[in-house]
Amino acid sequence: MRGRLLIFCGIPGSGKTTIARLVAGSVKDSILIQTDSVRAMLAHPEFSSAESRFVYDACFGIAREALKNGYLVMLDGTFMREEYRSEARSELRKYYSRADTVWVSCGLETALKRNARRKVRVPPEKVEGMFRGFEPPKRALKADTSRLSPSAAASRVIREFLSR
């Protein structure tokens, strides 16, 4: 039994987690794996490259086990570059039957406002850097949260990827 993989990518504050939680709540046998949840386990997160490597590796390990057990796995992380999204698919390739990407986007000001309301905030200068450096996915369902409500975006993800 092989599971399915959905990668939610976008800058901090774009709405990835909100949408992914709505999708997870609507789909039986799903698991939401969030890089933010793993990072929150660190006493003093630095948002460094080495720390991000640790966080993503931990998420891939959890995803691997969930996929082996037939779950719909939703990976919720920035995944700034296509190479990072490709790495996730490659690391988990033999455990899923299908992988899709959801790109959650919004404007910088919106992302900064949302980030400021978080319990664990990404430093604003890091959000700005990620906004400037984010590489849009080559193939993905785009959910622009400045135009779509979280529930509309979640419904679109379900309709596009999970209702078949």
Image: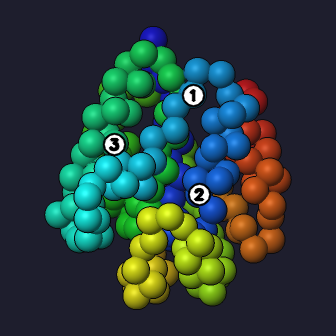
Task: Identify residue type, mark 1.
Answer: Ser
Disc 1 residue crowd, few under 14, some 14–19, many 20+, Cα 10 Å: many
Where residue 63 sits, quadrant-wise, is top left
- Give the label on residue 59, or none: 3
> Disc 3 vs disc 2: Cβ atoms closer than 8 Å?
no
Q: Residue furthest left?
A: 50
x and y percent of residue 62 in the render? 34, 33
Disc 2 residue crowd, few under 14, some 14–19, many 20+, Cα 10 Å: many
Give me the residue at 62% from left, 46% from top: 20
Give me the residue at 63% from left, 36% from top: 24
The structure's colour scheme is: rainbow
* Above-or-below relation of 140 to 31: below
Q: What is the distance, in whole Å, between disc 3 and disc 2 at their CAs?
A: 16 Å
- Give the label on residue 30, or none: 1
* Above-or-below relation of 52 to 74: below
Q: Which residue is mark 2?
A: 16
Q: Is residue 73 visible?
A: yes
Disc 3 residue crowd, few under 14, some 14–19, many 20+, Cα 10 Å: many
Where residue 21 sits, quadrant-wise, is top right
x and y percent of residue 101 in the render? 54, 50
Where residue 39 sits, quadrant-wise, is bottom left
Secondary element at tag 3 = helix
Task: Identify residue type, mark 2.
Answer: Lys
